[in-house]
Amino acid sequence: MEYSKRIYIFDTTLRDGEQTPGCSMNPQEKLTMARQLERLGVDTIEAGFPVSNASDFEAVSLISSAIKNCRIAALCRATKGDIETAMLALKKAVNPLIHIFIATSDLHMQYKLRMEPEEVLSRIYESISYAKKYAPIVQWSAEDASRSDIDFLCRAAETAIEAGADIVNFADTVGYSTPSELRNMIRAIKERTKGIENVDVGIHCHNDLGMAVANSLSCIGVGVNQIDCTLNGIGERAGNAALEEIVMALNTRSDVYRAHTGVKTEQIYRSSSMLSRIIGISVPKNKPIVGENAFQHESGIHQHGVMANRATYEIMTPESIGIKTSGIVFGKHSGSHAFFERVRELGYDLGQELLDDLFLEFKALTEKKQEITDFDIEALIASKTHTRQFYKLDRFVINSGNTIRPTSIVRIEKENGEKLEAVATGEGPVYASYEAIGQILAQELTLEDYSIRSVSEGGDALGEVAVRVKAGNRTVMGRGLSTDILESSINAYISAINKLIALGALSYTK
Ligand code: KIV
Ligand code: ZN
């Protein structure tokens, strides 16, 4: 058998991905995603930056307790305080990894760090040797490596290795590099850095010029054996290298790369959809691998070719990333036992109270929709879990038409059963309903984004609404799900409000 190199996947969806505006997740949502990343088979899950905020700290702790089959990484600056906080958050992890970063380019050292190069080297040495006392695996990352002086970069990497780093990682932080430049950078590091043969070497690429995936792949074959990436390519600005593209490129073109990962590719589609649902950002239709059009053949010539032999226009199969035409799973007569079993098979580990609650929703759904698929069940789970229900929708009545200004009466219920109602008009029925809820709350709320998509196929498909809502300096996503899109819209708004209350951005009296 031909030799194939193992490439380690360092997934940073929950850290670099999540720190992107509009992609934020609460700790429970991150835990749900982490469980899916574990099923996907990534090697490392970077769960957060614990010192940066309490929610990241909590997420890293929760994930450390729950995930046993991946390394759990926590990000730190090169300071003792950051390292101590990260170690505390990682306390329960079976395989903890401390990830220390510091910039190495002149630009960053002078203007951001305000440090002399020699001071940066001392910091690297001190922080890594300190972290090594507590953590079995320490990764060092050179921020803005691709714009750094190569001699200095090699000295910095050598210092990190001398101090005990197990992995040295090089970031194209602003997505400036080209594939050949990055490949040459890694080649030079491999040739000139003492001790580099004893550590793992990683690459971390951003997508500002649309080259993150190509840049990452260009470093295979010259010594990189770890790639940092995110699902759906989410991340700062234009995002990070997309995990699904890296993995499928390695799979499909193993003849070129002679490399493989431990990712279970049949979990890719589910992972991508779950993330998209949680953060409320849909995957562009033409996105490679996971976009809706990725396996569709529109033109007659292509359809004809595919019917004769799929290989004519298909270089991968939809099944290889886990797209199945999910047949009928459930209907009106399905019982709770079968439903709970299916939820478990889908990989969710939910408490009985939540399961009972979900089953009631599921039953209500079977009254409106004949065939319930896995996609519907997962959408139901995503809409129900994760947030305390400070408010829930009790009822609404909307009067709308093309010759009148829509009016909405909305009644919402507090946890103690108290019901609050308001009436409002608006440009459309959704806006009128949001106005009514705004009147009940009497607090400043801004709707920043609204999107709707159908979860499955058919006239009775579930409509899933995602909204981005801001209160004070916090922005959250809310989701709502129903066969009635106005109900989905109202529920999405209420779910965002519940999250904002949980974050303390809106007040709530019991
Ligand atoms: O882009 C970057 O430089 C980073 C580092 C923390 C690795 O995300
Ligand atoms: Zn980054």
Image (tube, rainbow, N blue to C red):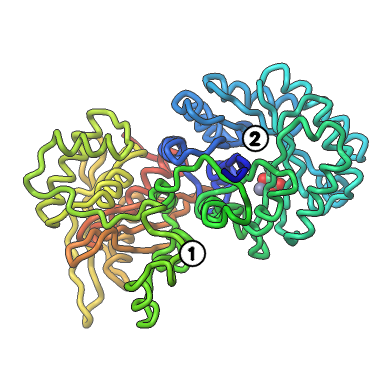
Name the disc covering residue 75, or none. Answer: 2
Q: Is residue 37 above or below residue 216?
A: above
User: Which residue lies at the image location 30% right of the left edge and 53% below the top edge?
Assistant: 480
Could you say whether the residue bearing mark 2 is in a helix, strand or loop? strand
- Give, as a three-letter code, the residue at label 1: Lys
Q: Is residue 83 above or below residue 148?
A: above
User: Which residue lies at the image location 21% right of the left edge and 40% below the top edge?
Assistant: 358
CA distance for labels 1 and 2: 29 Å
The answer to whether any part of residue 278 appears in the image is yes
Which quadrant of the figure has residue 81?
Answer: top right
Query: Residue 37, percent across and down?
Result: 46, 40
Could you say whether the residue bearing mark 1 is in a helix, strand or loop? loop
Q: Nearer the viewer, residue 345 or 455?
A: 345
**Mark 1 Cα shell of 10 Å, populated few (<14), some (14-19), many (≥20):** some
Say which label, 1 or 2, has the lower sequence index. Answer: 2
The answer to whether any part of residue 176 appears in the image is no
Query: Residue 253, percent across and down?
Result: 56, 57
Whether the residue carrying mark 2 lies under 8 Å from ligand 1 is answered with yes
Q: Is residue 114 above or below residue 97?
A: below
User: Which residue lies at the image location 41% right of the left edge and 46% below the top edge?
Assistant: 267
User: Which residue lies at the image location 61% right of the left edge and 60% below the top edge?
Assistant: 238
Report the side of 154 relative to 51 (left or right): right
Query: Residue 71, percent across and down?
Result: 56, 30
Which quadrant of the figure has residue 80?
Answer: top right
- Give, as a three-letter code, the residue at label 2: Leu
Q: Is residue 138 above or below residue 186?
A: above
The residue that mark 1 highlights is: 287
Name the disc covering residue 33, or none. Answer: none
Q: Nearer the viewer, residue 434 or 104?
A: 104
Whether the residue carrying mark 1 lies under 8 Å from ligand 2 is answered with no
Query: Residue 465, percent across and down?
Result: 33, 59
